[in-house]
Amino acid sequence: MITAKIPETDFPLPKLGTADLHGPIGLDEHGLEPRGVVRWNYEVPELQQHALRRGDGTFSKHGVLTANTGARTGRSPKDKFIVRDKVSESTVWWGDVNQPCTPDLFNRMLHHVEWFLSHRDELYVQDLFCGADQNHRISLRLVTETAWHAAFARTLFIRPTARELVHHEPEYTILHAPHLLADPEGIEGIDSNAFILLSLEHKVVLIGGTQYAGEIKKAMFSIMNYLLPESGQLPMHCSCNTTGENTAIFFGLSGTGKTTLSTDPNRRLVGDDEHGWTDGGIFNFEGGCYAKLINLNEEDEPAIFATTRMPGTIMENVILKPDGTPDFTDNSLTANTRGAYPLEYIENREADGIAGHPQNVVLLTCDAFGVLPPISKLTPEQTAYHFISGYTAKVAGTEMNIDQPTATFSACYGAPFMPRHPGVYAKLLSEKIEQHHSQCWLLNTGWIAGGAAQSSRIKIQWTRSLLNAALTGQLDNVEYTVDPLFGFSIPQTCPDIPTEILNPRDTWTNHEDYDRQAQELAAMFKDNFKPFIANTAEPICSAGPQ
């Protein structure tokens, strides 16, 4: 085996000892007849050495595996399908997001994947759990041809103990063949070389033609989002932290600050991306974090920055300098550079991944138009409206063909992963907010003062101060003013924050320009919400812009 020199570190590597242990379910029950070596449940350090041997990555100066995902550096939503069958027909919200495919197509691709994986020289199998709450977690198995994707799964999901492992029986299985390219001309129903197919009846996910590791993580998230509402539990695309007595959850699309703001030295991190809200409280789906690394710096995000120097972390599409250190400003491969690391690498964390009911619900948005306040208080109805809307904005230069700020709406802050109608999740959220008297906030981590074209993004120190003031009750008794267009309440003072930035209209040189831009954004909200009106309660429909 090829080895690499890993520098000494104060951070412990994951313990070894469970390699090749597995439960009673063999690969033959997945239709696989491996011709090569099967490596069961290897730990991350071993897997990373295999990745290096196979040429699937390199080590940074600090001993961190760095992998390149090739042509696909993000998710492929147009290539994701759910099998439309007797299980899913009446329970999935079909449309552009939840695209249907036929059982025949799934079976055809399943045979392709089974043959392909069976003929690999090596297979890597990981038996894991999704969900920290034993009452609601599901067991899963990943079978993949690549060591570094096995390491990614072992980092992001919950690792079983040796005792749990020998009894592990997967409820859902992911067959992962990133180097198997589909033929869109020869296979009807496939639109590109990539495919992500979920069968809820067979409890199998097929992933092929894409090396982007996030597809593995989000496949399981989609499954949890389908299963939990059946028992009245709410799956959420959110981060969470707690003091033990005070818990907060943070909804938001990618780039709005879920990972950054939930990683707080004064509050214990529960998780950075996927949680469930049950009758008992909050639980993390995952055992690791998957942070965006573009423009990461030690001053603003010290805890996340530290993980990029800990062996065991995996960096995706990060460019290394000649001396082996990462260049987090280099977006030549993608702006979606990522780091996967175990929760243990965050010192201030909630070890069991479970917290109480949230006292605060925070909706994050990165408003590039400069219209939304840095912070505002929402009623429960407004919270449900903005939750269904799932608004943020893309900034010029972050994606091809975007040359000015562009509004993005993603229902429930995670539409690509929500198989059921958004109203199902919004109803559950409203009920839980009301039951537990949670305070609700809209936090703009983007721009004011003319928007992205005329100013810099709101200082992260200001955003943290505003958030801390909300979570600690410092905004409970201050004076508020109601925005005449959007209807939310804006605090007029906040400790350590310049008063003049709290009302965004006051930060614009020309108030008429602000009014015009605010009306345009309000119209975007209204147009986006039209498809949801028929299945949404009237008080929620009336809680949007007037």
Image (spheres, grey):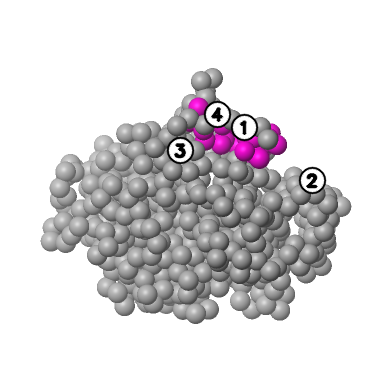
Inspect the image, locate mark 1, and give the three-letter code of the amino acid beneath it.
Thr
Q: Position of residue 19 (x, y in %)?
A: 62, 53
Measured Cα–Cα span from mark 4 to mark 3? 13 Å
Measured Cα–Cα span from mark 1 to mark 2? 20 Å
Task: Name the quadrant of the N terminus.
Answer: top right
Residue with the mark numbered 4: 5
Residues marked 1 and 2 touching at CB (< 8 Å) = no
Residue with the mark numbered 1: 3
How crowded is the residue under tag 4: few (<14 C-alpha within 10 Å), some, or many (20+)?
few
- Label 2 secondary element: loop
Give the residue drawn at x 42%, y 50%: 344
Q: Is residue 61 magenta?
A: yes
How crowded is the residue under tag 3: few (<14 C-alpha within 10 Å), some, or many (20+)?
many
Residue with the mark numbered 3: 310
- Label 3 secondary element: loop
Measured Cα–Cα span from mark 4 to mark 2? 26 Å
